Image: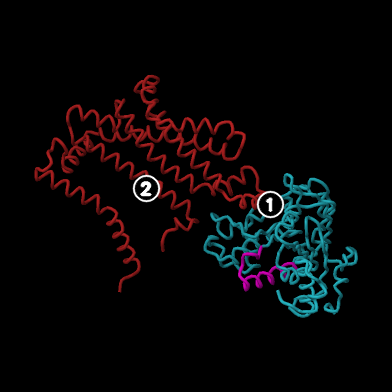
């Protein structure tokens, strides 16, 4: 007889194992092809040499400095852009006058691919920090804005009416009914925004930078250190996965009431 | 005997003063010459209605006749473009904390537990009071659950607890049982009747089920084209059984709603 805890642990490891099966398989095959000489080291270094390059950069401390620089830019841009998008969305979702005033302008700006502004931004800010943070903020603001507005709109009018009959108004009404009702949609926006945040950062760091992961990749290319180039790509993948995992965690803890996100028993 | 009443007698408007005086807990409602318009559409035209304190009034009528609008007018959710609505003597100014509404859908907040949903109805969100109200509707053991796991009838009971927890003087029901199955409906009717008898609030029930109206109400008014077309006092003892008297009231009101020939139908003893 197995205890239910042991069985749970077993199914838990099994599902995690299934999730990582394909990435691990890819790495194994890649290593094998590299060591067998099918793929040249100059074109694609093997996983082992990428790990070795990573270890070297960890020991001299560069890797953490680069990751730290990139993360700081990403988060700063995310907070600024996400904050602006969120506040605009609340304003426009609740006040028809504000919406009339700003929505069509926002929609117009939204259709511009924000990465096309890079030449302009280099002209304005040089290759300093502001330009990259500005780009991230600009890219992140729209998915947060659109999904928050959509979330506020899709709150059931019946619930708001119910709240009013119970004397809720102003901020209390927002806090009790409108915000929680819009939250599932806001979190979808958050997930999109996290994706855009990393993409924007990668592009802007490769083009103009003197630190960060993008800089590390471009610098390594100059010296033909393919292992470092591949390492930076892997780091981006891991950071992307990390932020997606965080977003999922938020959904799971804040949307427990939603049958879709309830942990399975 | 109620069944011996002629339909003529039933249709006479009751005199407000002559009803037995109930405790003064319930609000008296006076609607005078109320007109409600939505754009060009006039939903209520010069409607007059007085509900004495503590009475259980049912409003019946075909869909679109304005019965829900009348209820929303009493709730303060609609404004009369002409005429007045006064509750408890004073002119009503919109939403009031002693007036509660139960809607056709329970309108529970899915992101709050059952208990927290009921707490919306108490000022200050007193937990003990909310639990007490849940006990009243027999759902104290589900306090920590999410509303999404409850059945339709249970959700309406939570909504009832939420409405009752603030001890309202006027409780308005907008077809709250319309979406429930027949058995749950009967249970809910009994629960509402019991709570009304205990707490003595004034109750107004909008329904298109004439049988439900006769089962619960002291008085049934029929709304037609935005005015009150018929006003019937139900002189039946509680708890009500589906006896001759009951069927008599039911068929007489139903005939009026359907505009069927009254004398012919009342002789046949048909069912719905």
Q: CA distance from mark 2 to mark 1?
A: 40 Å
Seen at 34% across and 45% down, the residue is A242
Q: Colour of chain B?
A: cyan
Tell if the residue under mark 2 belongs to the same chain as the one under mark 1: yes
Residue located beneath label 2 in the image? A245
The numbered dot on residue A255 is none
CB-based contact (under 8 Å), mark 2 and mark 1: no
The quarter of the picture where the N terminus of chain A appears is bottom left
- Can you tell which chain is drawn red? A
Q: Find residue B235 and report its horizontal and vertical position in percent.
A: 83, 73
Asked which quadrant contains residue A199, the reply is: top left
Give SS at disc 1: helix
- Judging from the image, mark 2 belongs to the subunit labelled A
Q: Main secondary structure of the magenta part?
A: helix
Say whether residue B197 is visible: no
Q: Is residue B58 left or right of residue A115?
A: right
């Amino acid at each position: 007889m197995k205890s239910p805890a042991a069985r749970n642990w077993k199914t838990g490891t099994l599902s995690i194992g299934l999730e990582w099966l394909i990435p691990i398989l890819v790495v194994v095959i890649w290593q094998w092809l590299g060591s067998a000489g099918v793929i040249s080291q100059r074109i694609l270094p093997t996983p082992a040499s990428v790990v070795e390059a990573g270890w070297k950069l960890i020991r001299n401390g560069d890797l953490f400095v680069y990751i730290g620089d990139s993360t700081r830019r990403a988060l700063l841009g995310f907070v600024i852009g996400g904050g602006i998008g969120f506040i605009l969305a609340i304003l426009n979702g609740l006040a028809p006058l504000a919406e009339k005033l700003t929505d069509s302008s926002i929609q117009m700006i939204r259709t511009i691919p924000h990465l096309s502004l890079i030449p302009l931004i280099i002209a304005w800010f040089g290759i300093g920090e502001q330009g990259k943070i500005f780009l991230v903020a600009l890219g992140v603001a729209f998915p947060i804005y659109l999904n928050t507005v959509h979330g506020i709109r899709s709150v059931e009018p019946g619930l708001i009416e119910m709240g009013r009959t119970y004397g809720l108004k102003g901020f209390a009404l927002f806090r009790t009914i409108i915000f929680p009702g819009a939250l599932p949609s806001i979190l979808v926006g958050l997930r999109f925004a996290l994706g855009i945040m990393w993409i924007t950062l990668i592009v802007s760091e490769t083009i103009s930078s003197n630190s960060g992961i993008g800089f590390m990749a471009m610098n390594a290319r100059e010296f033909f250190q393919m292992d470092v180039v591949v390492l930076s790509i892997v780091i981006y993948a891991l950071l992307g996965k990390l932020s997606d995992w965080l977003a999922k965690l938020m959904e799971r803890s804040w949307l427990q009431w939603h049958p879709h996100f309830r942990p399975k028993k | 005997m109620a069944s011996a009443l002629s339909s003529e007698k039933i249709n006479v408007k009751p005199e407000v003063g002559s009803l037995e005086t109930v405790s003064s807990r319930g609000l008296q409602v006076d609607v005078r010459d109320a007109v409600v318009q939505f754009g060009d559409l006039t939903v209520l035209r010069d409607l007059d209605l007085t509900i004495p304190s503590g009475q259980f009034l049912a409003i019946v009528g075909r869909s679109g006749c304005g019965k829900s609008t009348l209820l929303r007018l009493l709730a303060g959710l609609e404004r009369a473009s002409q005429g007045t609505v006064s509750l408890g003597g004073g002119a009503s100014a919109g939403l009031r904390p002693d007036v509660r509404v139960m809607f056709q859908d329970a309108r529970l907040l899915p992101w709050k537990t059952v208990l927290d949903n009921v707490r919306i109805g108490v000022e200050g969100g007193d937990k003990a009071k909310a639990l007490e109200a849940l006990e009243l509707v027999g759902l104290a053991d589900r306090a920590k659950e999410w509303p999404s796991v409850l059945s339709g009838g249970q959700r309406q009971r939570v909504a009832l607890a939420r409405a009752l927890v603030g001890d309202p003087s006027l409780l308005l029901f907008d077809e709250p049982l319309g979406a429930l199955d027949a058995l749950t409906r009967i249970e809910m009717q009994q629960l509402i009747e019991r709570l009304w008898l205990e707490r003595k609030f004034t109750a107004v029930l909008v329904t298109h089920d004439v049988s439900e109206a006769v089962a619960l109400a002291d008085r049934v008014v029929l709304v037609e084209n935005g005015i009150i077309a018929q006003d019937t006092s139900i002189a039946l003892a509680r708890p009500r059984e589906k006896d001759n008297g009951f069927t008599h009231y039911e068929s007489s009101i139903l005939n009026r709603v359907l505009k069927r020939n009254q004398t012919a139908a009342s002789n046949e003893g048909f069912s719905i």
